[in-house]
Image (cartoon, coloured by chain):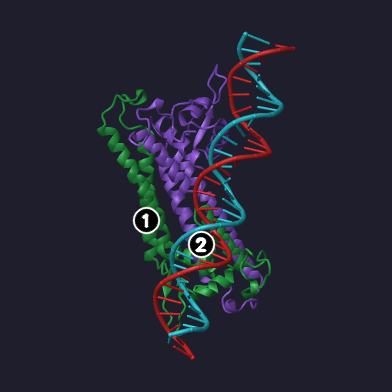
Chain colours: A purple, B green, C red, D cyan
DNA sequence: TTTTTCGTTCAGTCTTGATTGAACGAAGCG
DNA sequence: CGCTTCGTTCAATCAAGACTGAACGAAAAA
């Protein structure tokens, strides 16, 4: 089955020479790099190009993706706050559109992952202190290795900085205007 | 073969109840989440706990990892500027230690990926403009979809913010003190 | 009611990439 | 020179997860 979006709605059969399709694939690549299914990235890319409400089955057609994958990945993107499910009066199908502030929400997703990691590091540091010392040779004098402290500080700093960026983006508007 | 680090150097056979080992596994998880091999993450975690020069074969022993994987992943981390290969006089083996400013370099790696994506988006935008219009229906009035512009702006903003953070960390010291 | 059209779920397939282990060349040591 | 000990490379294995397609239940339409 064809892996590239249905070119019927665009201009090029391959997609390599159409900025729209290239952009969509690019978001797929990038998202995949970030550890997300490629299809989710392509969906997001499509919505960036065409934010208007798009029906469930039209998504499947335009991207040549099985309905199963559409269901899974739209729910994934919905959970991350990147797209929204909207009711279209008189229509039985589900419709989706780009969320209000997709990029702001994307940042929140990233910081959430970081915060989770950071908190387990904190727990490890506490456990390390509580457990006393003298269990392993190389930690005799210093309860918490400098690297662990540095890692914790790094995550804290990152989270703060990114949420600052999110707040700035949100204030400036943040939503994607067509 | 055992998947957990060799507990001989620590205190617990499972690693679940030793902050050091938990931390190492945690970094493995996090790095894997970020799309990097888990082993690379565990290596990095080990160096955060024990930054001192560690020999090639000791890495294999302590983490119960094949020499092939050590070779591959140390080179990966080296390329990312997270660890360094150091010469230990009189020793035939390769030794590694934590890089000077691992987290600063980590940020640069992230921004590099983002910049790459951003630049291809820029190219798409230019191509979209140059190609004139009137090729697809939904882009008749507006050359570049708002979502593409927003995505580009987002990446630019992210890169700027993160490099600002990197600069701040570098100035503040940035290196991990033992 | 029956029929059709939805979206979801899940078992199965398939792709991708990590990991290993053996083979190899280089380089110090005897 | 052999012999050993390195680190690298590569084919083969293995595992994780994406993706599909069919089966399913719900709900509108007829």
Residue drawn at the location 41% of the way across and 29% of the way down? A50
Residue drawn at the location 57% of the way across and 79% of the way down? A141
Q: CA distance from mark 2 to mark 1?
A: 24 Å
In the image, is B73 to the left or to the right of B172? right
Residue B33, percent from left and from top: 53, 53
Secondary structure under tag 2 reads: helix
Circles 2 and 1 on the same chain: yes
Q: Where on the picture, by quarter, is residue B154?
A: top left
Q: Is residue A144 visible?
A: no
Q: Nearer the viewer, residue A144 or B86?
A: B86
Residue drawn at the location 43% of the way across and 36% of the way down? A45
Q: Nearer the viewer, residue B112 or B55?
A: B55
Mark 2 Cα shell of 10 Å, populated few (<14), some (14-19), many (≥20) = many
- The subunit letter for the residue under badge 2 reads B
Mark 1 Cα shell of 10 Å, populated few (<14), some (14-19), many (≥20) = some
Q: Quadrant of the C terminus of chain A?
A: top left
User: B39 above or below A140?
Assistant: above
In the image, is A25 to the left or to the right of A151? left
Residue bearing the label numbered 2: B40
Numbered circle sitting on residue B163: 1
- The subunit letter for the residue under badge 1 reads B
Secondary structure under tag 1 reads: helix
Q: Nearer the viewer, residue A175 or A135?
A: A135
Q: Where on the picture, by quarter, is residue C22?
A: bottom right
In the image, is A46 to the left or to the right of C4? left
Circles 2 and 1: CB distance less than 8 Å? no
């Amino acid at each position: 089955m064809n892996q590239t979006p249905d070119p019927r709605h665009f201009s090029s059969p391959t997609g390599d020479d159409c900025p729209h399709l290239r952009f969509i694939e690019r978001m797929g690549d990038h998202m995949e790099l970030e550890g997300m299914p490629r299809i989710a990235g392509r969906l997001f890319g499509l919505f960036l190009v065409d934010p208007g409400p798009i029906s469930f089955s039209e998504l499947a057609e335009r991207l040549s993706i099985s309905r199963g994958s559409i269901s899974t990945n739209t729910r994934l993107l919905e959970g991350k706050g990147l797209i929204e499910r909207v009711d279209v009066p008189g229509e039985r199908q589900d419709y989706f559109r780009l969320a209000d502030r997709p990029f702001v929400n994307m940042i929140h997703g990233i910081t959430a992952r970081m915060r989770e990691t950071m908190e387990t590091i904190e727990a490890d540091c506490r456990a390390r202190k509580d457990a006393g010392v003298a269990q392993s040779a190389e930690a005799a004098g210093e309860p918490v290795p400098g690297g662990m402290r540095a890692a914790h500080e790094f995550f804290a700093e990152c989270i703060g900085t990114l949420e600052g960026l999110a707040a700035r983006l949100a204030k400036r508007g943040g939503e994607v205007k067509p």
